[in-house]
Amino acid sequence: MEQINAIGRRKASVARVYLTQGTGNITVNGKDYKEYFPQHHIQPAVVQPFGIIGVDNAIYDIKVNVDGGGIKGQAEAIRMGISRALVKLNEDFRSPLKQQKMLTRDARVVERKKYGKPKARKSFQFSKR
């Protein structure tokens, strides 16, 4: 197996994922993913695709370059990239990952602020008199 690459996106984050045969190392921007994402509630999102397909992630080495957005968006972009790379590796993984919506790009982004308003939709207090 040579190197398989895929791209995952979420909000403003773009993750380029490179999957190779290895020992289970997940490296994000040159650091271990547990060091890059010190928040314990975000770490499971990165390895979630392996749990869905029932494959141990110790078989593969994953190298990720991620840029843009915040930590939550980056983690979800990495999750999507890993899912896409696994589908390229084996087409049988497609249906369980698709059922869990791991292959669908979540296009929800923050709505822009409009002029004359303090936020996107919030209005200033209305005074009749």
Image: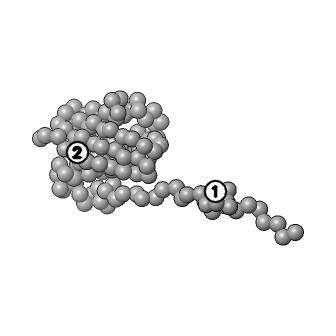
Neighbor class of circle 1 (other Cα within 10 Å; few <14, some 14-19, many 20+) is: few
SS under mark 2? strand
> Of label 2 and label 1, which has the lower sequence position?
2
- The disc placed on residue 47 is none
The extreme front residue here reads: 115
Which percent across, then down, holds residue 83?
28, 50
Locate residue 16 relative to residue 109 in the image: left or right.
left
Occupied quadrant, residue 33: top left
Residue linked to disc 2:
5
Tell me: residue 37, above or below residue 72: above
Residue linked to disc 1:
119
Which percent across, then down, holds residue 44?
39, 42
Residue depicted at x 34% and y 59%: 104
Residue depicted at x 33% and y 55%: 102
Inter-mark Cα distance, 2 to 1: 39 Å
Q: Tell me the amino acid under the disc marked 1.
A: Lys
Which percent across, then down, holds residue 49?
31, 48
Residue depicted at x 25% and y 48%: 6
Q: Tell me the amino acid under the disc marked 2.
A: Asn
Which percent across, then down, holds residue 24?
25, 34
Residue 53 visible in the shown view: no
The quadrant of the rendering that contains the N terminus is: top left
Q: Nearer the viewer, mark 2 or mark 1?
A: 1
SS under mark 1? loop
Residue 102 visible in the shown view: yes
Locate residue 35 relative to residue 60 in the image: left or right.
right
The extreme bottom residue here reads: 128
Count every numbered label the image shows and give the total. 2
Locate residue 107 relative to residue 82 in the image: left or right.
right
The quadrant of the rendering that contains the C terminus is: bottom right
